[in-house]
Image: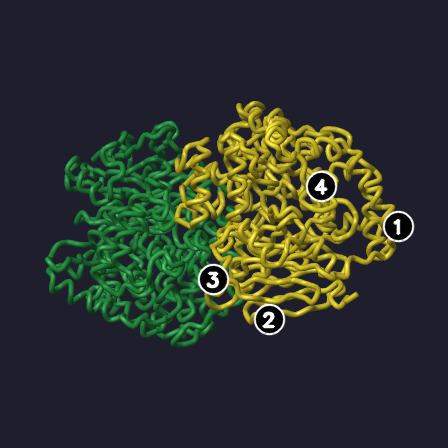
Chain colours: A yellow, B green
Amino acid sequence: MGRKIVNKILRVDMTNLSTKIESVPKEWSGLGGRALTSTFVAAEVVPTCHPLGEGNKLIFAPGLLSGTAAANTGRFSAGAKSPLTGGIKESNAGGTAAQQFARLGIKALIIEGLPKGDTWYSLHVNKDGVSIAEETELIGKGNYAVVETLEQRLGKKVGILSIGPAGEMRMLAANISVKDKDSRLRSHGRGGLGAVMGSKKIKYISIDDSDAPGVSLADPERFKTAARALAKAIINHPATGEGIPTFGTSVMVNIINAAGSMPTRNFTHGQFEGHNDIAGETMREVILARGGSPKHGCQAGCIMQCSQVYNDKDGNYVTAGFEYETIELLGANACIGNLDDIAVADYIMDDIGVDSIETAVTFGVAMEAGVLPFGDGKEVLRMLKEEIGMGTPLGRILGSGAGNCGKTYGVTRVPVVKNQAIPAYDPRAIKGIGITYVTSPMGADHTAGYAISHNLMGSGGRIIDPLKKDEQVELSRHLQIGTVIVDSAGLCLFVGSPMADDPTFVPSLMELINARFGLALTPDWIGELGMNVLKTERAFNIAAGLSSKDDRLPEFFKEPLLPHNAVWDFTGEEIDEFWDF
Amino acid sequence: MGRKIVNKILRVDMTNLSTKIESVPKEWSGLGGRALTSTFVAAEVVPTCHPLGEGNKLIFAPGLLSGTAAANTGRFSAGAKSPLTGGIKESNAGGTAAQQFARLGIKALIIEGLPKGDTWYSLHVNKDGVSIAEETELIGKGNYAVVETLEQRLGKKVGILSIGPAGEMRMLAANISVKDKDSRLRSHGRGGLGAVMGSKKIKYISIDDSDAPGVSLADPERFKTAARALAKAIINHPATGEGIPTFGTSVMVNIINAAGSMPTRNFTHGQFEGHNDIAGETMREVILARGGSPKHGCQAGCIMQCSQVYNDKDGNYVTAGFEYETIELLGANACIGNLDDIAVADYIMDDIGVDSIETAVTFGVAMEAGVLPFGDGKEVLRMLKEEIGMGTPLGRILGSGAGNCGKTYGVTRVPVVKNQAIPAYDPRAIKGIGITYVTSPMGADHTAGYAISHNLMGSGGRIIDPLKKDEQVELSRHLQIGTVIVDSAGLCLFVGSPMADDPTFVPSLMELINARFGLALTPDWIGELGMNVLKTERAFNIAAGLSSKDDRLPEFFKEPLLPHNAVWDFTGEEIDEFWDF
């Protein structure tokens, strides 16, 4: 078995078009996923550099447990300085790349520098390392075409990371797509990392894991036992064992609407009249009636299958990985209220390569500006294809994110933190998630500390009242620290529920890491890692010019939100206590 | 003589459409111009408010000496939180407003709140105070049409502050126009204050100074003697007595080109081949040949007459107040190199109401992005009229300033500080002005501390080498502190030369202020005022979320600039020493 690149870092310098294989620095050896990408960005990227200039670096890293048989450990982290927020960014996604990288023994792929001239390139990763090639045919093409063509060129099993036209045009909402096992697309959505890849003139990265050495386990038996325990904890929990597998993430539509936290009409209302039309329960019926699939995993080894395959009325494939965030933000916040339109929008966003959260919120802002009417789904579809996809001036505005769109049109109700769009939970009525939005070094990001669990679902054994300020800062801090290991092990965020409620979860996770690497870490290590990574990320942001004044919600959240007349009433001092650890 | 509003503040609340007349708070009584607007903004505007929201306030204040017979004291200050920089802003302009306000006994006009609904308004200032009226006819019209119509409605002597379509559309580059004595336009150009006025739905403010009480002097004889001494110092200095009156501000074209500091082709070169075609010497010949006027004052009582009236080939008026900055930034930096095109562009920018510095630099960035070719003057004219003026998506991008345009197109060479465009002196080859750009609380602003004087002209008795770092921080600090009294007394910036070189200047200025108000201030007061105002402004910015990381030039200024191969080589620590006072 050729093991020459086991536990190695692949480094690509696009300025000189050179590549090399490096050993992992000792201090990085216990890091994976987000812990590795954030540590790396903080160590090697000058915080004040232009995010699209030669000083920025783009790094991909599989989780610590990726490539093993442990359930739901196939998330892949991408990191860089974000052109959207101006701060550090880690965005993780499903797909096949994490498991392929891990099996190839690749700890991280680092891309630095910028090529001169107008030539576009691709990277090719395999058991021998990484190589660079010029690319012409696929330039300007959508991500679905990239997948189709590369599967023809390189075979069905090829792994793919790619950018669409939005990334090529360095739009701030551009994402990076990851092919999943069924040739559908998952996304490193947030923070404009597709623009960073585009600035380096890399259209795609293909991955060939033929003859991969595979992941070696220090103690295979111990690992197997722990993996079984972890899977059991996931399957036994009502959220991950039943709710999510049955209805997907859009099970949240009716829950969040009932809580009065459903962003509606550009964050002016907390409930949406047409919520049933876009709810997970409705979607499941539609999918089943049309021969789609209500269950689909973003990665091999997933035991939750939160995703789905959505077909049109004629039974033809429309989109997959069609999440609550997208559905809510186009459905209620942009008032489209029509699953079929939203599904097509989701497909186009994946294809042209823009973050569906950022873009959906941008449409809400554009609607408030009068660029198009609220609820005009057909016009959204046209603008996605003909404006953003074609890079017209309006497309540039819409593809630059909600903050930029708001500035360009002089709008004051612009739901962003650190210039990143706020996801589909209004923070006035679920205050714990608001604390996560303002304090996360990533900008507004529900996945950084998903307080919905404790504010609405009773994770941790009781409800922390979503409408009250009490305990929310502590809750978000606890969740954000804990989420670091999730994002670093390659775990899916949904394990948060069993992690909070099942006392066997954390010991099993520790056991998996110890058995994988031959270590003897204790659960304390998880908290230390979380605190260290958060502090590292925040220090990068401060050095980049962000301050505690960026840990704030926009002014308009003082407007009362029906039905609770909830307002955002945290003082700056109360928020800043988050960082007292 | 009706004196009921002498030394009063007029306050307008656009939320309730109410007005009142207030006494001047005791601690503000010795303040005027910038010292007053900045003190007021720091005191009454919440630093984190949205600049286009109801929390921002717009204040206008004449200088301490405005309305008197002292030469060149008719500058008018406008202040607010800037929607362009996110920090505090004072922008001053000539025209008739400062002298009219002063003669009416108005210390300041404060506009706060936002009206509900879509109705537009105007304000009317006269001896009885201020009133609000609805306006329909002039909405959507250019500033020249506003002047023409209001002179028909209210008589030739009416004073006017107005916004063009750009301000109505709340574009970040929108300015506020001030009518001058010949019904031409001057501008509160920088920082997007026109968008603030537009957010408050005020199209114009008309000023009727009939039966104004006039300015009373505590000691008229002493004032007269001091005014004579001040005028003599201005006339005796070669810059203000000869260079500026003969060639206008564009006398700088050949000087800055020779210094290799002439921003060319979006700040990639330091000299422009076609510099003679756009030089002040050429302009003077053209103006004389076409029956224009090479001398024109922005205010009554000006003894420098730096401005001019520029006619077309047929002798018809094109524009007035056609400054070095606009000429250089369109001529060399956007490579247009044709005075006639630039003059028409200047007229259109005044008419639609955008800052000519911000907009010209934005075109350089847009040209680098490939939106239009470098040097295409006709396309610039078309885009000004048909895109910015009409508020198309492209016009929105161009009207939002260089920083926003750069982000929207993914450009890395974007010459801004605090998101405000860098004026027509490349800071690599004149390092003193670079220190002013980075440290001024206003964002990149040459007028905040015009180091060109000491770096090139020998003000202060010797040249401080523009290519070396030595003494530049001290120089800029000295100039910025001294400029506060210039901006606060209502003085024209060009008095900086006699102020630096003629030992009679500062004593005469002190004498004027003492004789005007019956005070016994010593010249130390000038330094104290300057330091206090700068610190107040900076404190506002810090509270608004800016940090020392915003006191930096963009990364690309490390690229060597021909002919000197000059680079920007100040460390952050060196820059931050600016604030050690």
Q: Amino acid at mark 4?
A: Leu
Please tell me which residue lies in front, A294 or B406: A294
Residue underneath mark 3: B553
Q: Is residue B89 left or right of residue B287?
A: right
Disc 1 element:
helix
- Separation of marks 4 and 3 at Cα, in angstroms: 38 Å
**CB atoms at circles 3 and 1 under 8 Å apart?**
no
What mark, if any, has residue A479 been given in the picture? 4
Residue A309 vertical position relative to residue A135 in the rendered view, above or below: above
Task: Give me the residue at 36% from left, 31% from top.
Answer: B14
Residue B222 vertical position relative to residue A133 in the rendered view, above or below: above
Q: Earlier in the sequence, mark 1 or mark 2?
A: 2
- In the rendering, at what x and y percent does residue A386 appear? 42, 45
Please tell me which residue lies in front, A458 or B102: A458
- Separation of marks 1 and 2 at Cα, in angstroms: 41 Å
Q: Amino acid at mark 2?
A: Ser
Residue underneath mark 1: A222
Label 2: chain letter: A
Label 3: chain letter: B
Quadrant placement of the N terminus of chain A: bottom right
**CB atoms at circles 1 and 2 under 8 Å apart?**
no
- Separation of marks 4 and 2 at Cα, in angstroms: 41 Å
Residue underneath mark 2: A18
Residue A193 vertical position relative to residue A125 in the rendered view, above or below: above
- In the rendering, at what x and y percent does residue A282 appear? 60, 27
- Of the two numbered discs 4 and 3 in the rendering, the one whose residue sits closer to the viewer: 4
- In the rendering, at what x and y percent does residue B256 appear? 32, 70
Q: How many marks?
A: 4
- Of the two numbered discs 3 and 2 in the rendering, the one whose residue sits closer to the viewer: 2
